[in-house]
Image: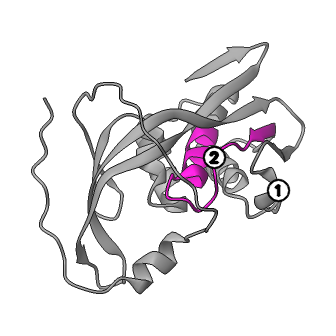
Amino acid sequence: MSETIDNTVTIEAAAKINLYLHVVGRRANGYHELDSLIAFTDVSDTLTLEPSNELSLEIEGTFAPHLPRSEDNLVLRAARALGKEAGVKPRARITLRKELPIAAGLGSGSADAAAALRGLAKLWNTDTKVKDLKKVGFSLGADIPACIFSNTVHVGGVGEHLQPGPNLPDAGLLLVNPGVTLATPSVFQARRGGFSPKMPLITS
């Protein structure tokens, strides 16, 4: 969800839930091929994007102390990448309210980057199409295209193949964060064993 008031864009970055995630193969470059169905929650981070003469990022909220304020932050990288794609100078004052835990399997960094891409495309009034936003997002992280989609989605390949998933009913979900961070690359590197078959996708 997003809204624009007085040239300020406020947009939510919803947490993702992998309803299932199967590793179905591994490419020669070491990347794992996935088969996953992803849904999104009503729990989110929030980005506020305002016009500015420069690009800046402020981080607040529960998990702000755990997120580095560096130029390598994924939100800033997304802004610079979109500026390059759209041919505009990346200028915006971005405030990220960080309420999703980091490295907890909820895709919070990817969701933030995806929200930044969608919101900045509005703020800068670019004609960037969704497919191009997904291309820019994929250059930054494999989960970002699905987060741009931000609806129930089936994910294949290494994250680049998206297909709309079934319309799921609202449901309650209990998420427990043990406070232990798990970096995705480390999880895949530690994985042992064979590969799973793909699941048949039912869309109705």
Q: Is residue 89 magenta?
A: no
Q: Residue at x 66, y 57 (%)?
A: 74
Q: Quadrant of the C terminus?
A: top left
Where 199 sits versus 118, above or below? below
Q: Residue at x 75, y 32 (%)?
A: 49
Badge 1 local density, few (<14 within 10 Å), some, or many (20+)? few
Q: Which residue is mark 1?
A: 65
Q: Earlier in the sequence, mark 2 or mark 1?
A: 1
- The location of residue 23, given as percent across then percent down, is 26, 70
Q: Residue at x 54, y 29 (%)?
A: 127
Where 9 sits versus 71, above or below? above
| 20 sits left or right of 138 in the view | left
**What is the residue that sits farthest to the right in this orientation?**
53
Q: Quadrant of residue 117?
A: top right
Query: Please, what is the three-letter code of the amino acid marked with disc 1?
Result: Pro
Residue nearer the viewer, 129 or 23: 23
SS class, disc 1 = helix
- The location of residue 133, given as percent across then percent down, is 49, 43
Q: Is residue 107 magenta?
A: yes
Q: Which residue is mark 2?
A: 100
Which scheme is used to colour this image of the protein?
one colour
Q: Residue at x 70, y 24 (%)?
A: 9
| 70 sits left or right of 192 in the view | right
- The location of residue 81, given as percent across then percent down, is 63, 53
Q: Quadrant of residue 159?
A: bottom left
Badge 2 local density, few (<14 within 10 Å), some, or many (20+)? many
Query: Please, what is the three-letter code of the amino acid marked with disc 2?
Result: Leu
Q: Magenta stretch?
A: 93-117
**What is the residue that sits farthest to the top in this orientation?**
6
- The location of residue 7, given as percent across then percent down, is 77, 18
